[in-house]
Amino acid sequence: MNGALVTFRKELLSYFVSPVSWVIAFVFYAWRGYELSSLSRYFAATNGDPDVFVSATYSRPSTFWMVILVPAILTMRCFAEERRTGSMEMLMTAPVKDSGVVVGKWGAAAAFYALLWLPTALSLHVLEYGPFLGTDLSFGPVFAAYLGMFLLSAMVLSFGCFASSLTDNVLLAALLSILFAFGLITLPQQLPAQLGELGQNYYVRELLDKFDVMRNFSEWFARGLIDTSQVAFYISGIAFFLFLTVVSVASRRVA
Amino acid sequence: MITVTDLTKRFGQTLAVDRLSFQVESGEVVGFLGPNGAGKSTTIRVLAGYHPATRGSASVAGFDVAKQSLQVRQSIGYLPENVPIYPELRVVEYLRYRAALKGVPARDRKVAVMRAMAKAGIEDVRRKLVGHVSRGYRQRVGLADALVSNPKVLILDEPTSGLDPNQRRRIKEVVRELAEEHTILFSSHILAEVQDVASRILVIHRGTLRADGAPDELVRSSVGRRLVVAAACDEAAMRQLLAGLPIEGVELVEGTNGLTRASAGLTEGADPRAEIGERAVAAGIALQELKLDAPSLEEYFQLMTEGADRAAENEALVGDSETAGAA
């Protein structure tokens, strides 16, 4: 526990002092701000439904950038960089459990990621005033949607940690993570058509439906509904990839 | 404090450490000496819990490195050969982080970090980013890291590697100071580094232990010692003087000033100087010089490593020629 907490603090500090983190934040806020102001002006001009506005904000390109690319950038250095520079030896010979190190690193990435999203919730509040929407937004769906987005990204972050533990090449780690996130978002919708008859099989469709994170997100979280089975799916996914990361890190001792 | 028994470590087909056994007692400063690639770092990494042994066992401070790795890591301060430190942290921040990681209680952490910095002599760079300090200072930051939890055992892998002479001297001074409170195992491929600070030396080569003892003791017991005699006599008298003594390969040189010098190899543990003195007095020969010429520790190290390689090569050649002859 101590090892996880100490690692968490150190890693979180590293994110804050890294120029890459600030570039990510700047690009995201500028891009997101532009998207939201354009969208709100459009809704104000067309007297659009404010609830539709909230769900519409999640289908903007910056959201995909945040789910596919940013987790990969945040986690690519987790273990790959430690191995490349040799600091892994210092970490692994400290009196701390491998699981503590893994949880601490993932926790810091997830916390920094959540902090990146936080100001965008405040910006939604600002949009309620003046020349933008000029109406109150329902913040129940906003909270649920942020939770859904965070759980999905936290799972991608846990895979990113795992990918980073497999190699000492940070770019390869990032690429693996991007492929995973891209596959998770697109494959469940694309595969049935590609699989032909097998894609129409009841069990295959059921399985793919469970993994269809975008559909589940728009049907549940974006509407302000929190389904415990969805939450359990993401938490299981996070635990699974963190477990794989611990195994991968521990196996390096054997090498 | 450190016990290594029949330790073997393989990396695929490569045998890095081969049935290595040694002990380090509490309070000892032991130099782990060997040429590059001898297996020093691999052995040290097994002791530090970074690599598991392929066979054999090792324990540190009474804990088995394989079964009680966490307790072993709590008991040691480890300085790897290349000190990799997060460049974005200040020296003091890095040491606070390491102290916390090593379980130093929060209330004691500040004092522990200050004490470690004082011992390693890095207080003047405490506010500098680790990425901005010189290699010598970085090595000492690594040393402070090893000391920060005040461990019983210090394992230092090539602590002076890549440093300039002044930095090397400073590190050696620090190690000497630390010897008063810690058990220290430190490796080097430079004999002078070890000779200056270690009370005992382990010589490792090709993964096996070649010698174990105090530096002087190793040289004294060396088979490379030679007897040197110079006396005012001719060659025949000198031969009489040396006849029947435990020596071999006598070389005589008759000088122009009536002196004859003799040099001969000694059998292990022999010291015939007293007998030569008595014989010279009895024969009325004036001795000008009588001494045992021991090789330097440097020569001894060469003998233990390169000499062993040559002997192995010769054995292999003899074996090959015998096989060819039999065929």
Image (cartoon, coloured by chain):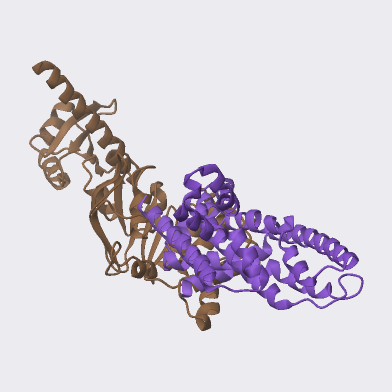
Chain colours: A purple, B brown
Q: Is residue B253 above or below residue B195?
A: above
Q: Horizontal placement of B239 versus B206: left or right?
A: left
For the question of whether residue B22 can be seen, the reply is no
| Residue closer to the observer: A224 or B109 | A224
**Res A42 → quadrant:** bottom right
Q: Position of residue B310 (x, y in %)?
A: 26, 31
As drawn, is B319 to the left or to the right of A234?
left
Among the 4 quarters of the image, the one containing residue B294: top left
> In the current view of this chain or complex, which residue is farthest to the bottom?
B107
x and y, in percent, of residue B7 in the image:
25, 53
Residue located at (61% from left, 60% from top): A215
Q: Nearer the viewer, residue A194 or B183?
A: A194
Residue B317 in view (yes/no): yes
Tell whether A15 sits left or right of A126: left
Screen quadrant of the N terminus of chain B: bottom left
Identify which residue, A94 or A182, lies in the foreground. A182
Q: Position of residue B295 (x, y in %)?
A: 29, 42
- Residue B215: image location, x then y, percent: 30, 53
Foreground pick, B15 / B235: B15
Q: Vertically, is B120 above or below B249?
A: below
